[in-house]
Protein backbone atom coordinates (compact mmCIF):
# COMPACT_ATOMS: atom_id res chain seq x y z
CA UNK A 1 0.00 0.00 0.00
CA UNK A 2 2.15 2.86 -1.33
CA UNK A 3 2.06 6.02 0.78
CA UNK A 4 3.17 8.50 -1.90
CA UNK A 5 2.89 7.32 -5.47
CA UNK A 6 3.88 9.20 -8.57
CA UNK A 7 3.47 8.24 -12.19
CA UNK A 8 5.14 7.65 -14.49
CA UNK A 9 8.40 6.33 -13.09
CA UNK A 10 10.26 7.09 -16.32
CA UNK A 11 9.46 9.61 -19.02
CA UNK A 12 11.39 10.14 -22.23
CA UNK A 13 10.18 12.89 -24.51
CA UNK A 14 11.29 15.31 -27.18
CA UNK A 15 12.11 18.96 -26.73
CA UNK A 16 9.10 21.18 -27.08
CA UNK A 17 6.58 18.62 -25.88
CA UNK A 18 4.22 19.07 -22.93
CA UNK A 19 4.10 16.41 -20.23
CA UNK A 20 2.53 15.78 -16.83
CA UNK A 21 3.59 13.88 -13.74
CA UNK A 22 0.93 12.78 -11.29
CA UNK A 23 1.27 12.39 -7.54
CA UNK A 24 -1.07 10.99 -4.94
CA UNK A 25 -0.66 10.43 -1.22
CA UNK A 26 -2.85 8.32 1.05
CA UNK A 27 -1.33 9.46 4.34
CA UNK A 28 -3.89 12.16 5.07
CA UNK A 29 -1.16 14.82 4.97
CA UNK A 30 -2.04 18.43 4.31
CA UNK A 31 1.20 19.53 2.65
CA UNK A 32 2.65 18.31 -0.63
CA UNK A 33 5.84 19.24 -2.45
CA UNK A 34 7.65 18.92 -5.75
CA UNK A 35 11.43 18.62 -5.69
CA UNK A 36 13.88 18.48 -8.59
CA UNK A 37 17.04 16.38 -8.27
CA UNK A 38 19.70 17.26 -10.82
CA UNK A 39 22.50 15.11 -12.18
CA UNK A 40 24.70 16.06 -9.20
CA UNK A 41 21.98 14.74 -6.85
CA UNK A 42 21.13 18.19 -5.53
CA UNK A 43 17.52 18.30 -4.27
CA UNK A 44 15.85 21.62 -4.81
CA UNK A 45 12.32 22.49 -3.78
CA UNK A 46 10.10 23.72 -6.58
CA UNK A 47 6.64 24.05 -5.07
CA UNK A 48 4.73 23.32 -1.92
CA UNK A 49 1.00 23.25 -1.37
CA UNK A 50 -0.89 23.28 1.90
CA UNK A 51 -4.54 22.21 1.69
CA UNK A 52 -4.58 22.94 -2.05
CA UNK A 53 -3.10 26.42 -1.55
CA UNK A 54 0.24 27.29 -3.16
CA UNK A 55 2.70 28.20 -0.40
CA UNK A 56 6.09 28.07 -2.08
CA UNK A 57 7.06 28.77 -5.68
CA UNK A 58 10.82 28.78 -5.85
CA UNK A 59 11.88 30.73 -8.93
CA UNK A 60 10.70 28.02 -11.23
CA UNK A 61 10.08 28.90 -14.92
CA UNK A 62 6.41 29.43 -15.57
CA UNK A 63 6.52 26.50 -17.99
CA UNK A 64 6.09 24.46 -14.82
CA UNK A 65 2.58 24.54 -13.44
CA UNK A 66 1.50 22.56 -10.41
CA UNK A 67 -2.13 21.68 -9.87
CA UNK A 68 -3.71 20.41 -6.69
CA UNK A 69 -7.30 19.24 -7.25
CA UNK A 70 -7.50 18.11 -3.62
CA UNK A 71 -5.12 17.77 -0.74
CA UNK A 72 -4.25 14.18 -1.65
CA UNK A 73 -3.08 15.05 -5.16
CA UNK A 74 -0.43 17.34 -6.57
CA UNK A 75 0.31 17.09 -10.27
CA UNK A 76 3.07 18.79 -12.22
CA UNK A 77 2.58 19.92 -15.77
CA UNK A 78 5.54 21.04 -17.86
CA UNK A 79 5.13 22.94 -21.13
CA UNK A 80 7.63 23.28 -23.95
CA UNK A 81 10.16 20.90 -22.45
CA UNK A 82 13.84 21.82 -22.69
CA UNK A 83 16.99 19.72 -22.44
CA UNK A 84 17.76 21.31 -19.07
CA UNK A 85 14.54 19.95 -17.63
CA UNK A 86 16.05 16.47 -17.64
CA UNK A 87 16.20 15.41 -13.98
CA UNK A 88 14.49 13.26 -11.40
CA UNK A 89 11.35 14.85 -10.00
CA UNK A 90 10.17 13.85 -6.55
CA UNK A 91 6.79 14.37 -5.04
CA UNK A 92 6.59 14.38 -1.24
CA UNK A 93 4.04 14.95 1.48
CA UNK A 94 4.09 15.86 5.14
CA UNK A 95 1.88 17.09 7.90
CA UNK A 96 2.38 20.70 8.81
CA UNK A 97 3.11 22.17 12.18
CA UNK A 98 4.69 19.53 14.35
CA UNK A 99 2.21 16.67 13.98
CA UNK A 100 4.59 14.61 11.87
CA UNK A 101 7.55 16.59 10.68
CA UNK A 102 9.23 14.37 8.12
CA UNK A 103 8.41 14.30 4.46
CA UNK A 104 7.48 11.05 2.77
CA UNK A 105 8.71 10.77 -0.79
CA UNK A 106 7.43 9.10 -3.90
CA UNK A 107 9.78 6.92 -5.89
CA UNK A 108 10.68 9.73 -8.28
CA UNK A 109 10.11 10.29 -11.99
CA UNK A 110 13.18 10.30 -14.19
CA UNK A 111 12.48 12.75 -16.99
CA UNK A 112 14.75 12.64 -20.02
CA UNK A 113 14.33 15.30 -22.69
CA UNK A 114 15.95 14.46 -26.03
CA UNK B 1 17.27 32.24 4.39
CA UNK B 2 18.20 28.88 5.82
CA UNK B 3 21.05 26.89 4.35
CA UNK B 4 22.35 23.37 4.91
CA UNK B 5 25.97 22.45 4.24
CA UNK B 6 27.48 19.02 3.92
CA UNK B 7 31.20 19.45 3.48
CA UNK B 8 32.05 15.84 2.59
CA UNK B 9 30.97 14.96 -0.97
CA UNK B 10 32.18 11.36 -0.51
CA UNK B 11 33.30 9.12 2.31
CA UNK B 12 34.39 5.53 2.65
CA UNK B 13 34.31 3.22 5.65
CA UNK B 14 35.29 -0.37 6.24
CA UNK B 15 32.44 -2.76 6.93
CA UNK B 16 31.70 -3.06 10.68
CA UNK B 17 33.50 0.22 11.42
CA UNK B 18 31.97 3.52 12.52
CA UNK B 19 31.64 6.60 10.34
CA UNK B 20 30.45 10.14 11.00
CA UNK B 21 28.88 12.37 8.36
CA UNK B 22 28.96 16.12 8.96
CA UNK B 23 26.24 18.69 8.53
CA UNK B 24 26.02 22.34 9.47
CA UNK B 25 23.13 24.68 8.94
CA UNK B 26 22.37 28.33 9.20
CA UNK B 27 19.13 29.74 10.58
CA UNK B 28 17.82 32.56 12.71
CA UNK B 29 14.94 30.44 13.99
CA UNK B 30 14.91 28.81 17.39
CA UNK B 31 12.51 25.98 16.63
CA UNK B 32 12.86 23.61 13.69
CA UNK B 33 13.43 20.00 12.72
CA UNK B 34 16.53 18.34 11.34
CA UNK B 35 16.65 15.09 9.40
CA UNK B 36 19.00 12.65 7.78
CA UNK B 37 17.67 10.92 4.68
CA UNK B 38 19.27 8.05 2.83
CA UNK B 39 19.01 7.57 -0.93
CA UNK B 40 20.27 4.15 -2.12
CA UNK B 41 20.73 3.38 -5.83
CA UNK B 42 17.03 2.52 -6.00
CA UNK B 43 16.45 6.30 -5.80
CA UNK B 44 13.95 6.04 -2.97
CA UNK B 45 14.33 8.69 -0.24
CA UNK B 46 14.30 7.00 3.15
CA UNK B 47 14.18 8.80 6.48
CA UNK B 48 17.03 7.66 8.73
CA UNK B 49 16.59 9.84 11.78
CA UNK B 50 15.04 13.11 12.93
CA UNK B 51 15.75 15.62 15.65
CA UNK B 52 13.51 18.30 17.12
CA UNK B 53 15.49 21.43 17.89
CA UNK B 54 13.78 21.97 21.24
CA UNK B 55 15.00 18.57 22.45
CA UNK B 56 18.50 18.53 23.92
CA UNK B 57 18.78 14.76 23.84
CA UNK B 58 20.40 13.36 20.72
CA UNK B 59 18.17 11.10 18.65
CA UNK B 60 19.13 7.47 18.08
CA UNK B 61 17.71 4.77 15.82
CA UNK B 62 19.45 1.44 16.22
CA UNK B 63 22.92 1.84 14.63
CA UNK B 64 22.26 5.47 13.71
CA UNK B 65 22.72 8.36 16.10
CA UNK B 66 23.19 12.09 15.82
CA UNK B 67 25.32 14.66 17.57
CA UNK B 68 23.14 17.76 17.70
CA UNK B 69 24.93 20.92 18.75
CA UNK B 70 22.33 23.68 18.58
CA UNK B 71 24.61 26.57 19.45
CA UNK B 72 27.14 25.48 16.86
CA UNK B 73 24.36 24.67 14.35
CA UNK B 74 25.85 21.29 13.76
CA UNK B 75 24.03 17.99 13.17
CA UNK B 76 26.30 15.04 12.42
CA UNK B 77 25.21 11.47 11.77
CA UNK B 78 27.10 8.54 13.24
CA UNK B 79 26.67 5.09 11.72
CA UNK B 80 27.97 2.28 13.89
CA UNK B 81 28.81 -1.23 12.70
CA UNK B 82 28.56 -0.16 9.05
CA UNK B 83 26.90 -2.64 6.73
CA UNK B 84 27.05 -3.04 2.97
CA UNK B 85 23.42 -1.97 2.79
CA UNK B 86 24.34 1.41 4.26
CA UNK B 87 26.02 2.41 1.00
CA UNK B 88 24.00 5.34 -0.32
CA UNK B 89 23.76 9.12 -0.65
CA UNK B 90 22.98 10.71 2.69
CA UNK B 91 21.21 14.04 2.85
CA UNK B 92 20.96 16.34 5.82
CA UNK B 93 17.74 18.38 5.82
CA UNK B 94 16.22 21.29 7.72
CA UNK B 95 12.54 21.99 8.17
CA UNK B 96 11.27 25.38 9.18
CA UNK B 97 8.12 25.56 11.26
CA UNK B 98 7.11 28.86 9.72
CA UNK B 99 4.25 29.37 7.32
CA UNK B 100 6.51 28.78 4.33
CA UNK B 101 7.13 25.39 5.68
CA UNK B 102 9.80 24.03 3.37
CA UNK B 103 12.35 21.30 3.80
CA UNK B 104 15.83 22.30 2.63
CA UNK B 105 18.44 19.70 1.76
CA UNK B 106 22.22 19.72 1.80
CA UNK B 107 24.09 18.59 -1.30
CA UNK B 108 24.59 15.10 0.07
CA UNK B 109 27.45 12.80 1.03
CA UNK B 110 28.02 9.61 -0.93
CA UNK B 111 28.97 6.84 1.48
CA UNK B 112 30.92 3.81 0.26
CA UNK B 113 31.17 0.68 2.40
CA UNK B 114 34.36 -1.32 1.83
CA UNK B 115 34.05 -5.08 2.37
Image (cartoon, grey):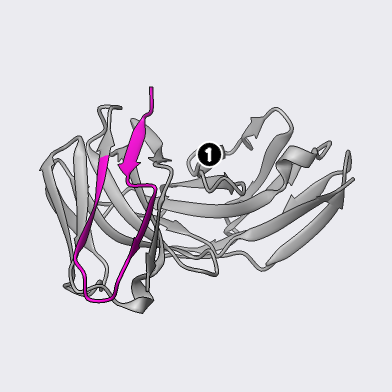
Q: How many marks?
A: 1
- Return the x and y of residue A8 as percentages of the image width and height: 33, 47
Does residue B88 appear in the picture of this structure? yes
* Left or right, residue A59 beside residue B49: left
Query: Which sits in the foreground, A1 or A46?
Result: A1
Magenta-drawn stretch contains A16 = yes
- Return the x and y of residue A73 as percentages of the image width and height: 19, 40
* Left or right, residue B87 beside residue B42: right
* Left or right, residue B6 beside residue B12: left
Query: Which sits in the foreground, B14 or B69?
Result: B14
Residue ID at (39%, 47%): A9
Magenta-drawn stretch contains A8 = yes
Outermost residue, top direction? A1
What is the magenta range? A1-23
Disc 1 is placed on an element classified as strand
Residue ID at (53%, 39%): B47
- The residue that label 1 is drawn on is B47
Q: Is residue A99 above or below residue B42?
A: above
Does residue A93 appear in the picture of this structure? no
Residue ID at (43%, 43%): A107
Quadrant including the N terminus of chain A: top left
- Return the x and y of residue A17 as percentages of the image width and height: 21, 70
Amino acid sequence: DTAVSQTPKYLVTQMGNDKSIKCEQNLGHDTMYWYKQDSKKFLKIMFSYNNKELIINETVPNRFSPKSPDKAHLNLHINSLELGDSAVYFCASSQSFRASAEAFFGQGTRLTVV
Amino acid sequence: AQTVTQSQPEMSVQEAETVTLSCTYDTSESDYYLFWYKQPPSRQMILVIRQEAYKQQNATENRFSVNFQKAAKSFSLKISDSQLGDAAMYFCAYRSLNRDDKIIFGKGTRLHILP
